[in-house]
Image (tube, helix red, strand yellow):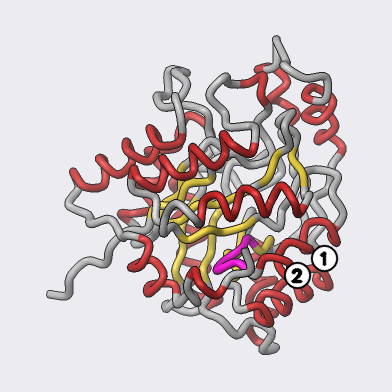
Amino acid sequence: MPRQKKIIISAAVTGAIHTPGMSPYLPVTPDEIIRQALDAHRAGAAIIHIHARDQKGQPTSDHGIFEYILSGIKQECDAVIGITTGGAAGMSVEERFSVIERFRPEMASANAGSMNFCFSRLTDFLENPVYGWEYPFVEKTYDNVFKNTFKDIQYCIETMNRCGTLPEYEVFDYGQLANLAFFKKRGTITQPIYIQFVPGVMGAMPMTPESMLFMIDQAKKLLGTDIRYSTVGGGRRMFRYETMMAVCGGNVRVGMEDGLYIKPNGELALDNAQQVAKLKEILELLDYEIADSEEARAMLCLKGKEEVAF
């Protein structure tokens, strides 16, 4: 009987959704992001997914801040470092994609379609914001379209192909699988397909067992049975959906970009490493083996940390 493949754990350490007032443990300065990324890697995360924030915790596309964070992580560990191209609400397409050509990372997010990306409900958790920008930043997403046209998607894929960066296709809804099938059929997609399912966002597919099983089935039918995939498990249901994804043959992602909690009763995670360690323990209790960074590179056909531009 063939040996079960190892599971890749990714940690998305800060993101561009949660704000400093939602949790005192969210890493919101460049140094905090570096420290928590390193701790998450030591806890078992082979891949670290990076968004940048300034000293006031506000999401930014500033290349100087990105350089500081990326090089700070790379110098201290062997983790695969993936970079967002999602940026933050309100950023232009040019701002979001500029990090790819500048830093040429091993992998980066590639959003598979436009959607109403809304997280305005999080204002309920902002009774005591730390900074004045937080409440309007969250509230305005009620009138926000996350723009990823076919032209944008093509530009993103072709840029990553040219830079040797593996696209991590973030799929928020069923129709976005058809978008990827279009680009595969026309030959724009030339690298192995790695999907990050993102259920549970207001404006996207629901996070239910039925919808996740449907998405995995349809992804294989549209894009081939040789694809690799993972899922975001947002909010308090993070660990149950990550476990389900592993059982369904996928990889897993945790981190304070996706959820601030360690237990569904609302207990806040103390850091990203705590979430990684919990999921790693769950998977190992189920007899799964966890991939290290070099094994993840081999599984995803990545170019290696020495080929990046930071």
Quadrant including the C terminus: bottom right
In the image, is 19 to the left or to the right of 290?
Answer: right
**Secondary structure that dominates the magenta span:** strand
**Residue 174 locus on image (x, y percent):** 62, 60
Q: Which residues are magenta?
A: 105-109
Above or below: residue 148 compared with residue 268: below
Above or below: residue 4 compared with residue 51: below
In the image, is 294 to the left or to the right of 95?
Answer: left
* Residue 106 on the magenta segment: yes
Above or below: residue 277 compared with residue 160: above
Q: Secondary structure at mark 2?
A: helix
Above or below: residue 227 compared with residue 71: below
The 10 Å Cα crowd at callout 2, few under 14, some 14 to 19, many 20 or more, is many
Name which residue type carries label 1. Answer: Thr
Give the image quarter of residue 168.
bottom right
Residue 153 numbered tag = 2
**Residue 237 locus on image (x, y percent):** 45, 33
Quadrant including the N terminus: bottom left
Marks 2/1: CA–CA distance? 6 Å
Q: Secondary structure at mark 1?
A: loop
- Residue at the far left in the pictured view: 1
**Residue at 70% across, 39% down:** 53
Q: Which residue is mark 1?
A: 149
- Contact between marks 2 and 1 (CB within 8 A): the answer is yes
Name which residue type carries label 2. Answer: Ile
**Residue at 35% across, 45% down:** 42
* Residue 304 on the magenta segment: no
The image shows a total of numbered marks equal to 2
